[in-house]
Image (cartoon, rainbow, N blue to C red):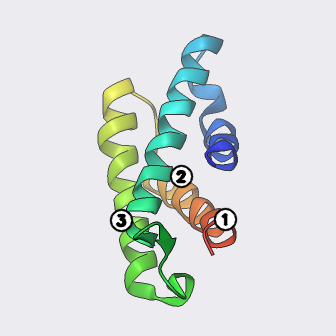
Amino acid sequence: MTRPFYGLVLESLNNQFSDESRRRAVCSETALGIDAVIQNLVIDGGQPIIDWQNKSNITGKILIQIGDYLIDEIRDKYNVQLGFDQIDNIADRCIDVAKRRYK
């Protein structure tokens, strides 16, 4: 399920790493982390929460937690240049993907 998230992250971080294997590893870790954040908030008892896509309290939490994850676990850990606009863009796009994947 992380493949779409991986593609979004790779597109955003593509020019951050000169080493291809490191780029793939960081993007994989990021995609898995984002997927875990989303599943933690939208899956309950193995099933998606009904109509979570339209609940601003849930989508707001997802946005905040993805942003926190990108700052703490990716930007700071790997010294990646990520601005807040870029972080918000990644989070918004991942939420759009999640709305289609976890219905």
Work out whether residue 83 can be spotted: no
Relative image position of residue 75 (x, y in whole percent): 38, 36
Residue identified by numbered label 1 = 101
Question: In percent of the image, x 49 and y 38: which residue is there?
Answer: 30
Q: Residues within 10 Å of mark 2 (few under 14, many from 20)?
A: some
- SS class, disc 1: helix
In this rendering, would 78 be left or right of 25? left
Mark 2–mark 3 Cα distance, whole angstroms, equals 14 Å
Q: Which residue is mark 2?
A: 86
SS for tag 3? helix
Q: Which residue is mark 3?
A: 64
Q: Does the CB distance between marks 3 and 1 fall below 8 Å? A: no
| The C terminus: image quadrant | bottom right
Between tags 2 and 1, which lies in front? 1
Q: Position of residue 87 (x, y in %)?
A: 48, 53
Whether 49 is drawn above or below 40: the answer is below
Give the quadrant of residue 16. top right
Number of numbered discs:
3
Q: State left or right for residue 86 relative to residue 64.
A: right
Kindly tell me whether residue 87 is visible in this rendering. yes
Relative to 47, is 9 above or below?
Answer: above
Residue contact at pointers 2 and 1, CB within 8 angstroms: no
Q: CA distance from mark 3 to mark 1?
A: 20 Å
